[in-house]
Image (cartoon, rainbow, N blue to C red):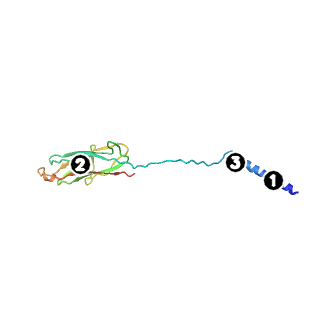
């Protein structure tokens, strides 16, 4: 064979192979194409610390006369005039007797007795984002001789401490 014939046959084989490859490519992909699409979005974000709101309402002084039982009413709530707490809170109530009198404390919440351990409650929950008020009555019973006035001088304190609830 001639060298030119060999070149022509070689060129025809290359063209046929290219056509076969293109046909196979068209058959397998079926007209689908693979592409990459990117879009960049510019955005800003702001973060704020959630605001806890915790309010205790009640008179500032408790008068113990030594004759009758004393009842003191107060409330604990998770809102004020402007906002509601954005977080769940757990709080405890502690009654501190700084007087010389032998006093007994009975704490009730909405008519139900609240357990006191060493004059302190267990943790009580206030949910966030929803207004909630817990109403309390503290009954103080005086067990000393009513004629002894000097032993009821001093004070009884109600300490209410709150922390953010752990989830």
Q: Residue furthest right?
A: 1
Question: What is the secondary structure assignment of the residue under circle 2?
Answer: strand
* x 73%, y 49%: residue: 22
Q: Are marks 1 and 2 in contact (CB under 8 Å)?
A: no
Question: What is the secondary structure assignment of the residue under circle 1?
Answer: helix
Asked whether 161 or 122 is in front, the reply is 161
Mark seen at residue 28? 3
Mark with earlier residue (3, 1): 1
Tell me: 135 left or right of 65. right
Question: What is the secondary structure assignment of the residue under circle 3?
Answer: helix
Closer to the camera: disc 3 or disc 1? 1
Tell me: 153 left or right of 38. left
Mark seen at residue 11? 1
Asked whether 14 or 99 is in front, the reply is 14
Closer to the camera: disc 1 or disc 2? 1
Mark with earlier residue (2, 3): 3
């Amino acid at each position: 064979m001639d060298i030119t014939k060999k070149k022509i046959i070689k060129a025809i084989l290359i063209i046929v192979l290219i056509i076969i490859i293109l046909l196979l490519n068209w058959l397998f992909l079926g007209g689908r194409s693979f592409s990459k699409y990117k879009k960049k979005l510019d955005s800003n974000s702001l973060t704020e610390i959630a605001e806890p709101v915790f309010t205790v309402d009640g008179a500032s002084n408790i008068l113990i006369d030594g004759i009758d039982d004393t009842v003191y009413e107060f409330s604990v709530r998770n809102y004020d005039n402007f906002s509601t707490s954005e977080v769940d809170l757990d709080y405890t109530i502690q009654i501190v007797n700084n007087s010389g009198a032998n006093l007994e404390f009975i704490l009730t919440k909405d008519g139900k007795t609240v357990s006191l351990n060493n004059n302190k409650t267990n943790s009580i929950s206030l949910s966030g984002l929803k207004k909630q008020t817990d109403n309390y009555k503290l009954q103080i019973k005086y067990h000393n001789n009513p004629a002894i006035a000097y032993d009821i001088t001093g004070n009884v304190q109600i300490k209410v401490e709150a922390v953010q609830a752990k989830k």
